[in-house]
Image (tube, grey):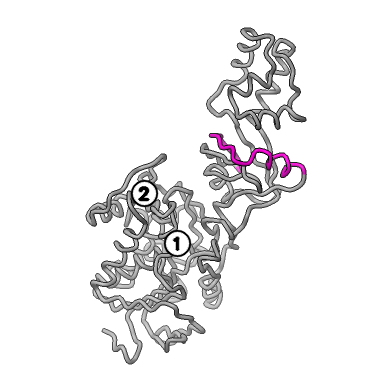
Amino acid sequence: MHNPGMGKYDVIVIGAGAAGLMCAGTAAQCGKSVLLLDHAEKVGKKILISGGGRSNFTNRFTTAANYLSQNPHFCKSALSRFSAGDFISMVEEAGIAYHERSHGQLFCDESAKQIVELLMQPCREFGVKAQLNTTISSIQKDETFELQTDRGVFQADSLVIATGGLSIPKMGATPFGLKLAEQFGLKIVPPVAGLAPFTFTGKEKEALQELAGISLDVSVCCRGKLFKEAMLFTHRGLSGPAMLQISSYWKPGDELEIDLLPEQETTSLLKLKRQSRPQAQLSTVLAELLPKRLVQLLTNGYIHDERMQQLNDKQIEHLANRLHHWCLKPNGTEGYRTAEVTVGGVDTNELSSKTMECKKIPGLYFIGEVVDVTGHLGGFNFQWAWSSGYTAGLAVAGMI
């Protein structure tokens, strides 16, 4: 066990977010002395703001298919070792009331603070030393890992990096973990902002700005991936769950293909309307299916507005095709400023999927968002934090 004067621990965890707290508590419960370091002034900052302050702490339907990675199989081992069901059990045992929203998303009834407290409880009980407001100036490995900080020198046999990604810099996000990985010669999958709203320029931006505030259920397709959820028009472009989800797959230059009426057989419907309401304007009929301002945008320049009886079959089919395949080309996303996650990170080929330990550097582990494993929107990124943190916590304690 450690001698506080020496600053020597069994395990040092850098990053007191979701993955780091889970790892520190798990390792301490297994009898290891643990130091938890963070440059922030409090633990679990991202947990506290998540889910509008109620923390979308996991997703009941978590599978490996809910994650992006250059190796889509990498996450399977950790997710099976500590599943969504395992975290739900922890929440229930702690007496935290929660509720389910659409698509299996689970939220606290009261506050995200309860999740932070749930993770802090074993840290306190099993003697994790949490050192916040700490700046690390260098890390070296000889027999042990040695960290030079503004709070002194600390040593440990195992070092776990749980520093998160680059998203939301105002919350304190930095490239610390990626730079450290590069220092130790590990490959990095170039990071990009994920789960971020789209921006547009020129005429498209002006046209979409007129629709700011409108939300509707759509399906959106890009690079062979499809998401069916709500889309929100904003002053800068497009947001809402459907757009955030697809943004993790989108690359500059790609078009988004949006189905504005995913539940409708629009061709037959419009032919029926032509028969039953021949005198009605097309824009009037469409306004019964879609928000009026959106119809104005679509009919102004995109689709010619005329009486239903004037439309022939070919025009109706062309119109239906336009509504089911509305193609837009964003000029970019809002980037890390508003992105919920970072896509990319430490290459999974550098790590053991069973333990999260570096293959080349014994005793060095990477967990959570700093790794090239990125979840879809809806609690999946927290579940990866819990699963990878728990796995590394057991591994540093020699339990795997």
Amino acid type, label 2: Phe
Secondary structure state at the residue bearing disc 2: strand
Residue 222 sits inside the magenta stretch: yes
Relative height, residue 368 to residue 205 (above, below):
below
Residue in the image at 37% along x and 75% along y: 36
Separation of marks 2 and 1 at Cα, in angstroms = 15 Å
Total numbered labels placed on residues in the image = 2
Report the disc number at residue 107.
2
Q: Earlier in the sequence, mark 2 or mark 1?
A: 1
Q: The N terminus is located in which quarter?
A: bottom left
Secondary structure state at the residue bearing disc 1: helix
Between 43 and 157, the one lying in front of the other is 43
Q: Position of residue 351 (x, y in %)?
A: 45, 66
Q: The C terminus is located in which quarter?
A: bottom left
**Does residue 28 appear to the left or right of 149 in the view shown?**
left
Report the disc number at residue 2.
none
- Residue position marked by numbered label 1 in the rendering: 46
Amino acid type, label 1: Lys
Residue in the image at 66% along x and 26% along y: 321
**Does residue 29 appear to the left or right of 356 in the view shown?**
left
Between 204 and 371, the one lying in front of the other is 204
**Does residue 141 appear to the left or right of 198 in the view shown?**
left
**Does residue 247 appear to the left or right of 59 in the view shown?**
right
Residue 157 sits inside the magenta stretch: no
Which quarter of the picture shows residue 113?
A: bottom left
Q: Residues within 10 Å of mark 2 (few under 14, many from 20)?
A: many
Relative height, residue 292 to residue 24 (above, below):
above
Query: In this picture, which residue range is highlighted in magenta?
Result: 203-223
Q: Position of residue 190 (x, y in %)?
A: 60, 63
Residue in the image at 36% along x and 81% along y: 157
- Whether the residues at callouts 2 and 1 have beta carbons within 8 Å, the answer is no
Q: Position of residue 374 (x, y in %)?
A: 49, 55
